[in-house]
Image (cartoon, helix red, strand yellow):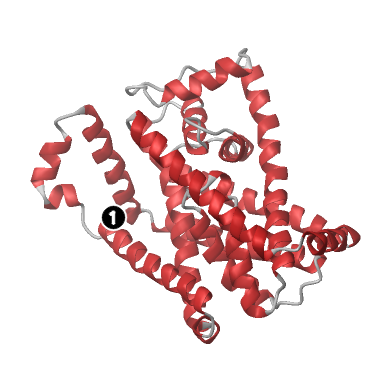
């Protein structure tokens, strides 16, 4: 648990970063020109519609990836139920600031629907997120190597590429550490230390659940395949949005840049990664001749299309709370309090 001083320090730093990025972007843009770019997008709605549809497919593939990981743990819920819970998590990530994050909401609802072991089932959410990020990093690094002349020719782009390559090294080392050998069996001292407290025991059980996926290669392969498909669809959605803005960049450019943007914006530097995402779109796409105004609008359109379906998760959430006979405030309170639960699953609806 962070101290109040640490929380306030983090907030101040995030606000400072956000302010600096907004000022930088404002100096890059001519507002009448940005308005003209907006009019261009409105005049070509088919690209935006295609982007919205493809963004739905990205959420569905991510939900199916998570369902596969749950099935590997013998948690068999209908696909529709898993998708509903996934969309609620997306809604919380986008609109619920503070203690109620999307992962917490997913854990709460999946445990409310099953009698499976709490720690192991909750770990599926972290594994799902981890695999998605891991695949984006590795695919991004591979594409950076293949397109290295482009990165080498532009300083800011080269820096982003090097950050991704560094993340790739860390991801490979972390993956090897998680799946090579069970560190709790290799180092008995760790086993004794984690067994001393209930929290330590849950940490060990969560780690061992990740480690046991070595024995579930089909589940891992399916999760990796869904992640690659998800990445391809997201890049295609971005390309459709770019087409509505009149961009002529090849699909390969979107495919190269998207993993970088996705991974770097996963770091919570600003609320909703606003400012970070737009700055990355500008820095990267300017290297292939895209105007800064078009790059900013592309970023905003991408964010807006994602919000359409994340907002739909809010409607599902209202249905879940109503089905449990609770008002919105009571349901939020249950989700917040679930993180302090010492082991029992939340009561069934």
Residue at x 51%, y 44% (from the top left corner): 15
Percent of width and height locating residue 148: 50, 83
Please indicate, yes or no, whether residue 232 appears anywhere in the rendered image. Answer: no
- Seen from this angle, which residue lies furthest right? 43
Instruction: Give the answer, above or below, for where 298 lies relative to 254.
Output: above
Give the image location of residue 3, x and y in percent: 32, 30
Q: Can you give x and y, in whole percent of width and height, for residue 20 in the image?
A: 54, 54
Figure quadrant of residue 42: bottom right
In the rendered view, does 225 fall on the left or right side of 232? Answer: left
Q: In the image as oriented, which residue stretches furthest toward the left?
A: 189
Q: Is residue 82 left or right of residue 45?
A: left
Percent from the top left, x then y, of residue 53? 76, 53
Residue 181 falls left or right of residue 23: left
In this view of the protein, can residue 114 be seen by the observer?
Answer: yes
* Label 1 SS: helix
Question: Residue most toward the top?
Answer: 325
Q: Residue at x 49, y 55 (%)?
A: 132
Q: Is residue 286 above or below residue 299?
A: below
Which residue is more in the foreground, 153 or 331? 153
Quadrant of the image for the N terminus?
Answer: top left
Position of the C terminus, as image quadrant, is top right
| x 48%, y 38%: residue | 103
Q: Residues within 10 Å of mark 1 (few under 14, many from 20)?
A: some
- The answer to which quarter of the image holds residue 289 is bottom right
On screen, residue 151 above or below 133: below
Instruction: Return the residue at label 1.
Output: 178
Q: Residue at x 57, y 73 (%)?
A: 256
Tally the numbered discs.
Answer: 1
Say whether residue 145 is left or right of residue 201: right
């Amino acid at each position: 648990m962070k101290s109040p001083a640490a929380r306030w320090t983090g907030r101040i730093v995030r606000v400072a970063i956000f302010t600096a990025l907004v000022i930088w972007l404002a100096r890059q843009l001519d507002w009448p020109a940005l308005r003209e770019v907006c009019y261009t997008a409105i005049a070509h709605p088919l690209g935006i519609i295609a982007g919205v549809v493809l963004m739905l497919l990205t959420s569905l593939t991510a939900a199916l990836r998570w369902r596969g990981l749950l099935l590997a743990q013998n948690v068999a819920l209908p696909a529709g139920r898993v998708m509903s819970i996934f969309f609620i998590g997306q809604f919380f990530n986008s609109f619920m600031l503070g203690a109620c994050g999307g992962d917490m909401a997913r854990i709460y609802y999946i445990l409310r629907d099953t009698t499976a072991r709490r720690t192991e089932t909750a770990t599926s959410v972290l594994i799902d997120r981890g695999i998605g990020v891991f695949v984006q990093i590795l695919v991004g690094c591979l594409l950076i190597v293949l397109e290295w002349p482009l990165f080498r020719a532009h300083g800011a782009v080269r820096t982003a590429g090097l950050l991704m390559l560094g993340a790739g090294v860390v991801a490979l080392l972390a993956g090897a550490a998680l799946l090579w050998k069970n560190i709790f069996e290799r180092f008995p001292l760790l086993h004794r230390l984690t067994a001393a407290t209930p929290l330590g025991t849950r940490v060990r059980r969560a780690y061992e659940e990740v480690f046991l996926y070595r024995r579930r290669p089909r589940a891992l392969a399916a999760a990796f395949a869904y992640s690659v498909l998800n990445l391809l669809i997201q890049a295609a959605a971005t390309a459709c949005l770019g087409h509505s803005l009149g961009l002529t960049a090849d699909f390969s450019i979107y495919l190269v840049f998207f993993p970088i943007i996705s991974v770097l914006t996963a770091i919570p530097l600003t609320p909703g990664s606003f400012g970070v995402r737009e700055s990355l779109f500008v820095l990267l796409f300017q290297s292939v001749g895209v105007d800064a105004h078009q790059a900013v609008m592309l970023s905003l359109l991408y964010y807006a299309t994602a919000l359409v379906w994340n907002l739909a998760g809010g409607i599902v959430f209202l249905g879940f709370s109503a089905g449990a006979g609770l008002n919105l405030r009571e349901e939020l309170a249950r989700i917040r309090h679930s993180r302090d639960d010492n082991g029992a699953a939340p009561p069934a609806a």
